Image (spheres, rainbow, N blue to C red):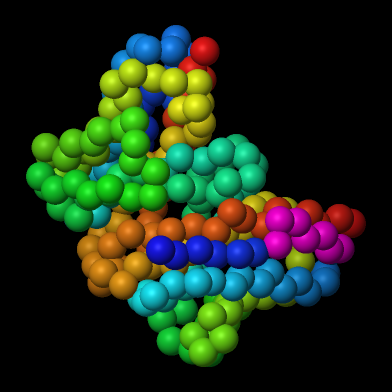
Amino acid sequence: GQSLEQPSEVTAVEGAIVQINCTYQTSGFYGLSWYQQHDGGAPTFLSYNALDGLEETGRFSSFLSRSDSYGYLLLQELQMKDSASYFCALRDQAGTALIFGKGTTLSVSS
Amino acid sequence: NAGVTQTPKFRVLKTGQSMTLLCAQDMNHEYMYWYRQDPGMGLRLIHYSVGEGTTAKGEVPDGYNVSRLKKQNFLLGLESAAPSQTSVYFCASRPDRGSETQYFGPGTRLLVL
């Protein structure tokens, strides 16, 4: 099976940088994704890493190291609207099912 | 485009009752998924479909059945609801195997008494 571990909560202040880590166990997978979910809302796609290295999308970056079974989401220039839950997720080896971690709640204060 | 829609938005059931949750997408996506979300548990995959007429089990399929008779619709059925099935249910769709983004519906809140 597959499993993902991420911190349950992270706090930061506006303008800061925060890193949300994700470690995983799997026998094989396609890539690592990150989703954002605001309270009461639907999850929305943020980024995807198929290969090792850093992917940058505006203020958000995501990193994957397959040899370390580790990835992270980096959020820069934090804003209040970034307060949300962030989920890492593995696409299975068949490229079909997406399995999520339990999520990290980010609280951004002024 | 409406994207992914879910019906109903909220429902209260008594233990033992049955119901069907409907997910519809108007983006001609091949893949569709049903997840449940419980506090502290993240999103757990119930069943999924890789195309019309196909279904497969996810992480937590027990107590649920699904059908994908039409490409645009993915139905989730609870034959005999239990309090443990109280949850928020999210449907998602994905264009095809070459696309990584999953598009989620707004969710259905289900309370089983």
The answer to which image quadrant residue B70 occupies is: top left
Q: Quadrant of residue B16?
A: top left
Residue B73 shown left or right of residue B69 in the figure: right
Q: Give the residue displayed 52% in from the left and 41% down from the top.
A: B37
At a point 82% along the width and 60% down the height, the residue shown is A11
Which of B36 and A86 lies nearest the eye of the viewer? Answer: B36
Q: Quadrant of the N terminus of chain B?
A: top left
x then y, percent, for residue A58: 60, 75
Q: Nearer the viewer, residue B59 or A50?
A: B59
- How many numbered circles are shown? 0
Percent x, y of residue B47: 30, 45
B89 or B30: which is nearer to us? B89
Q: Residue at x 82, y 71 (%)?
A: A16
Where B101 sits versus B113, above or below?
Answer: below
Q: Looking at the image, which residue sits at the far right?
A: A110
Name the one closer to the observer, B16 or B96: B16
Rendered position, A77 above or below A14? below
Relative side of A94 to A41, left or right? left
User: Where's residue A6, x and y in %?
Assistant: 64, 64
Tell whether position A43 is magenta: no
Segment colored magenta: A7-13
Q: Residue at x 75, y 56 (%)?
A: A9
Task: Please determine whether, in this image, residue A15 is positioned above or below residue B72.
Answer: below
The answer, for residue A45, to whether it is visible in the render is: no
Q: Is residue A76 visible?
A: yes
Asked if the stretch drawn in magenta spans residue A12, the answer is: yes
**Left or right: residue A95 compared with residue A66:** left
